[in-house]
Amino acid sequence: MKFYASGNLPNVPSMYFIYGDGGTGKTTLFKMFPGKKMLMSFDRSTNVIEPKDDIDTIVFEPDDMANIQSLVVGYLQRAIASGKYQAIALDNVSALQNFVLENIDDASKDGRQNYQKLQLWFRQLSDMLRSSGITVYATAHQVDTGSSSLDGTGGFQPDMNEKTFNAFASMFDLVGRIYMHDGERMIDLNPESGNHAKNRLDNRTLIKAEELLKTEKESD
C-alpha cells in the first residue's frame, strides 16, 4: 500500500489495448509512440517494423512456447530495469493466451482450475506492466459475438477468454476496436456501441487511428 498526500499523486503512463481484424494496422500503430520502444511479437507479424522506427523487437519462435510465461516475464523485467524504453508493446495477446493456456493444460487436466490459473497469470502480467512506469500497448484479434447494440452496430470483442481479458485489461486506460470505414482506420472507444471498449483518458468515443495518442483537448 502507498499513501499519497493530495497533489502528490504521480502521473502514471497510459496503457492502450487495441483489437481488430488482421490487416487493420494494429502493429503499425505502435510506430506512432514516441521514444525508444520494444515490441514483443507472439504472432511474428513484424513486416511493418523498419529500422527508422526505433523499435527493438523480440520475436518468439515455436521452440519458445513451452517456456513462454517465464520468457515473457524475464524479458519484460529486464526491459523495464534497463530504463531504455519509453513504450512496450505486446503483439498479439490472443496468440500469447493460447500458448499460455496450452502450457497450463499440459500441466493439469482440471479445466476450471486451468482457466483460473490463466486469468491469474494475465492479471499479474498486467499489474507488472502498470507498475513499470512505461507506456504500454497491447493488441489482439477480434471475434464476432453475434450480438449488437440497440442501433444494430457492434458485437465484437477481443479474441480471448472473457474472464482472462477482463483480468488483463482491467489495468488498461483505453480499450478500442480498430476497423476500416470508407478507406480510413477508425477506433471505437464507446462501451455503448456493443463492442468491448472504454476510454478513461478523455471523453472521446470514436477517433481516427492516427489520433490514438492525442487527448480530447489536443484534438480540438
Image (cartoon, rainbow, N blue to C red):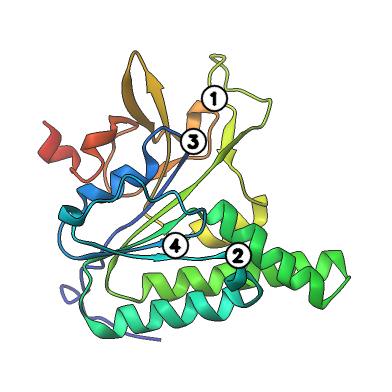
Q: What is the quadrant of residue 40 in the picture?
A: bottom left
Determine the secondary structure under disc 3: loop
Marks 3 and 2 sit apart, C-alpha to C-alpha, by: 21 Å
Marks 4 and 2 sit apart, C-alpha to C-alpha, by: 29 Å
The tag earlier along the polypeptide, 4 or 2, is: 2
- The quarter of the image holding the C terminus is top left
Taking depth in this image into account, of 103 and 145 the one nearest to the observer is 103
The tag earlier along the polypeptide, 2 or 1, is: 2
The residue carrying pointer 1 sits among few (fewer than 14), some (14 to 19) or many (20 or more) residues within 10 Å by Cα, namely many
Q: Is residue 44 left or right of residue 201?
A: right
Q: Amino acid at mark 1?
A: Gly
- Please determine whether, in this image, residue 138 is positioned above or below residue 218: below
Mark closer to the observer (3, 1): 3
Determine the secondary structure under disc 2: helix
- Residue where numbered disc 1 is placed: 154
Percent position of residue 64, x then y? 58, 72
Determine the secondary structure under disc 4: loop
The tag earlier along the polypeptide, 3 or 1, is: 3
The residue carrying pointer 4 sits among few (fewer than 14), some (14 to 19) or many (20 or more) residues within 10 Å by Cα, namely some
